[in-house]
Amino acid sequence: MTRIHHRTCNICEANCGVVIATEGREILSIKGDPANALSRGHICPKATALEDLQNDPDRLRAPQKRTGSTWETISWEQAFAEIGERTRAILEHDPKAAALYVGNPNAHSYGNTLTTGDLKRALRTRAVFSASTVDQMPHQVVNLRLYGHSGLWAIPDIDQTQTMIILGGNPMASNGSVWTVPDFRNRAKALQARGGQLVVIDPRRSETAKIADRHIFIRPASDAFLLIALLKALQPGVPALSPHIRNLDALWQALAPFDSAACLERAGVSASDVAFLVERLLAGPAALYGRIGATTQAFGTLVAWLIACVNIVSGQLDRTGGLVFPSPVIDMVARTGPGGSGRFHSRVSGHPEVLGEFPAAAMSEEIETPGEGQIRALFVVAGNPVLSTPNGGRLDRALAGLELMVSVDMYRNATSRRAHYILPPVGPLERDHYGLFLLPMAVRNFAAYSPPLLAPAGGGKQDWEILRGLAEAISGERVAGRSPREILDQMLQAGPYGISLAQLEAAPSGLDFGAPEGGRLPDRLQTKDKTIDIAPATFVADLARLSGEMARPVDARLRLIGRRHVRSNNSWLHNSPRLVKGKERCTLMINPADARARNLGDGSLAEVISRTGTVRLKVEVTDDMMPGTVSIPHGWGHGLEGIAMQTAQAHAGVSLNDLTDETAIDPLSGNAALSGIPVEIRAAG
Ligand SMILES: Nc1nc2c(c(=O)[nH]1)N[C@H]1C(S)=C(S)[C@@H](COP(=O)(O)OP(=O)(O)OC[C@H]3O[C@@H](n4cnc5c(=O)[nH]c(N)nc54)[C@H](O)[C@@H]3O)O[C@H]1N2
Ligand SMILES: Nc1nc2c(c(=O)[nH]1)N[C@H]1C(S)=C(S)[C@@H](COP(=O)(O)OP(=O)(O)OC[C@H]3O[C@@H](n4cnc5c(=O)[nH]c(N)nc54)[C@H](O)[C@@H]3O)O[C@H]1N2
Ligand code: SF4
Ligand SMILES: [Mo]
C-alpha cells in the first residue's frame, strides 16, 4: 500500500518541506510540499537523493573497527566498551589529551546539538574544534559584540525589500546560509517583479549573479576595503539613527584615515558602482547580506562588522524590508549563554578560544606537537576535516599518528579512514528532525517537526544515542537526562507561541507564524545597556592590521577561491550516482586571458601550486571568472587510499584544501582565511 508522508529535508540549512511516497521501506517518490509555508513547494535535486543516501550500499550500518589496514564489523557493545577503556587509559596518562571536532551536519540535527555536550563533558576537554571556524564564526563574533549574543541573527527581509545586495554568497547554489531561505529563486523573482533589484558582488559571475540586476566583480579578500569606501560614501547622507545605536562618531573617526579611492582600487570596484549602492541603500528598504566568500578571509570579522555598519548607518537594521530580527518558535537566544572569547588559549600557538572553540586550522599542530596536552584521542562527530579544513594534507598525516580516533559518521571517507572506530548513525529517513538552529534564521517565523519516516534498520542508532553511549562508556556513569524529543517538546511549550510537540505533529506541513517584522529594538538586544555599540574597541583596533595590509604591495599571483554546486553538499554527497552524473564538476575555472597567458586550453590539465600543496585538475575556461581569479570547488578529493565510497571514488576530484593555508587565520574569530589563496598555475605536461 502506498503511503504519503510530509517531512522536512534535513540535508541543508533550507529546511524544505517534502512529500515522500513509500511502499513498505521502498521510496516511490520525493516531491516538494506546496503546503509548507516556508518552502512553498520548492526542493532542490539533493532532496530526491535522500533516497540514494538512505539506500546507499556504501553507507555504514554497524560499527567498524580498524586494526592496521584491516576493517571488521563489531557490535555496539564491543565498540562502546573498547572506546571507553582506551579513552580512559589515555586520559589517565594525560587528562588533557582528548579533543573533539564537530562537523557541519551537527547544525542540522537538533539531537546532536542537545547531546554533544554530554560527550564533551565526558572527555573533560577544552580542545574543541568545529566547522564554524571554516565558516561563519566572524558573523557570530559580530552578533556577540553588537547585539549581545553570538546566536542573535538579523536576516535580510528578502520578501519585503526593494534592494537585496549579496556579498560573497551564492544562494542559487547553496540555498542560503545563516539565512533559512528556501525557494530563493522565486523570492528573487518576486523582488524583481515589484520593481526591486538583486545585486551581487562576487569575483565570479555566479549562478546568483546571472539572475541579478547588477553584478559587480570584486577582487578576492578585498571586501573590507570596498565596505570602508561604501561607508565613507554613505556618511554624508546618513539619516538620524535610532537612539539605540551609540558610538557612531568613533566609527567615522576610525575610518577617517582610509583613502576611498585607494580602497576601491584595491577591491577592483568602480566609484560608480559604489554610488549606485549608496543610492539604493539610502532609498531603502534594502539589505546587505554577506556570506562565506566574505567571511572566510583574514579580515573576516572586520568584514562582518562593516556589513553590519552599512546596514545600521543606512537605517536598514531592524526595519521591515531591511534586516530583521525573527521571532523564532524556540528562542535559542533566551536558552543559551551569549558566548565569549579569550577566556583561555590554545596550547601551541596561543590562539584565544572563541565561543569555546579553537581554530579548526590549528588542529594539526595540536596533534603533532609533543608535550602535556598533546591531542592523542580525537573524536570527530559528523565532520570531514581532511577535506574541509585548510591544509587538509597536513591534518591527514597528523591523524595517522593518533593513539585513538573515533568518527561518528556513516561513511568511510577521507577523514574517517584514519579512525580506529567508525560509529554510523541511522539513515537520513530513520531519524527525526527539527531545525533548532536554522528556523531562528528563517524568512518566516515557522516550525515543523519530522518524526522518523522509517523504523531504524537492524538495531541502528541515531547520532544522539551514539553520543550518549560514548559519554557513558568514557565516564563510566549513566548520563541522566531526557531524550532530545522530550527536551524539544518542553522547549516548544516554553517558547513564545506556547505550542506542544503534539500540536506541531498534528500539522505535518508545519505551523506558520508570519513574516519577521522590524521594530524589535531595543527589547530584542541582549546587551546589558540595551544599546548597540557600533564601534567596539576590538574591531576598531583591528583596522590597524588592515592599514598594514593596505600599505603592502599587491601580490601579483592569481587568487584562488572556492565554489558550490547545487547538486553536492560539502564533501559528503558525492556518492550519489544521480547527483554526480554529468559534466565533471571539480574543475579549475579560469578567465580566458589568464588561461591564454599560461597556454591552458579548455579541457586541458593544469597544475595549481600554493604554499601548502600542488594539485592537478582539468581547466574550464570561462569569462565568468574575474581576471586574476581562479576557482576550484571544495569537498572533493576522494581518491585517497582506504576510502570506501565507490561512486565518489569514481569521481574523485582533488581537494581545494590541499592548497589552502592553515597559517592564515582571522585573529578575532579564529576563522580560516580560505578566499583569495595566492597560487601559481601552469600547464601540466
Ligand atoms: N576551501 C574551502 N573549504 C571549506 C569551505 C569552503 O567554502 N571552501 N566551506 C566550509 C564550510 S562552510 C563548512 S560547513 C565545512 C564543512 O566541514 P565538515 O563538517 O568537516 O565537512 P562536511 O563535508 O560537511 O562533512 C560532513 C561529514 O558528516 C557526515 N554526515 C553527514 N550527515 C551526517 C549525520 O547526520 N550524522 C553523522 N554522524 N554524520 C553525518 C558525512 O559523511 C561527512 O563525513 O567545510 C568548510 N570548508
Ligand atoms: N548545494 C550546496 N548547498 C550548500 C552547501 C554545498 O556544499 N552545496 N554547503 C552549505 C554550507 S555548509 C554553507 S556554509 C553554505 C554557504 O553558502 P554560500 O555562502 O552561499 O556559499 P557559496 O555558494 O560557496 O558562495 C560563496 C560565494 O562567494 C564568492 N567569493 C569567494 N571569495 C570571495 C571574496 O573574497 N569576496 C566576495 N565578495 N565573494 C567571494 C564565491 O565566488 C561564491 O560565489 O551553503 C550550504 N548549502
Ligand atoms: S535546498 Fe536543502 S533542504 Fe531544500 S531540498 Fe535541497 S538539500 Fe533539502
Ligand atoms: Mo558551512
Image (spheres, rainbow, N blue to C red):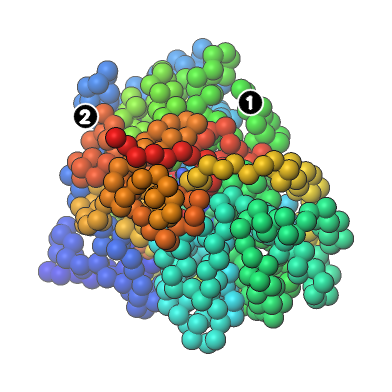
Can residue 253 be seen by looking at this rendering? yes
**Crowdedness of circle 1 by 10 Å Cα count: few (<14), some, many (20+)?**
few
Q: Is residue 462 visible?
A: no
Q: Is residue 424 above or below residue 482?
A: above
| Residue labelled with disc 1 | 349
Looking at the rendered structure, which numbered label has been put on residue 56?
A: none
Task: Read off the residue under disc 2.
Answer: 73
Of residues 345 and 299, the one drawn nearer to the viewer in this rendering? 299
Please tell me whether mark 1 sits on a helix, a strand or a loop: loop
Q: Quadrant of residue 223?
A: bottom right
Q: Amino acid at mark 2?
A: Thr
Residue drawn 82% across the image and 72% down it: 236
Residue at the image point whose x is 57% and y is 32% from the top: 663
Residue in the image at 34% along x and 53% along y: 620
Quadrant location, ligand no. 3: bottom left
Q: Earlier in the sequence, mark 1 or mark 2?
A: 2
Foreground pick, 153 / 20: 153
| Separation of residues labelled 1 and 2 (CA atoms) | 39 Å
> Relative to the observer, which residue lies in front, 84 or 663?
663
Amino acid type, callout 1: Ser
The quarter in which the N terminus is drawn is bottom left
Q: Which residue is situated farthest in the left direction here?
A: 1
The image shows residue 263, relative to residue 316, as above or below, that is: above
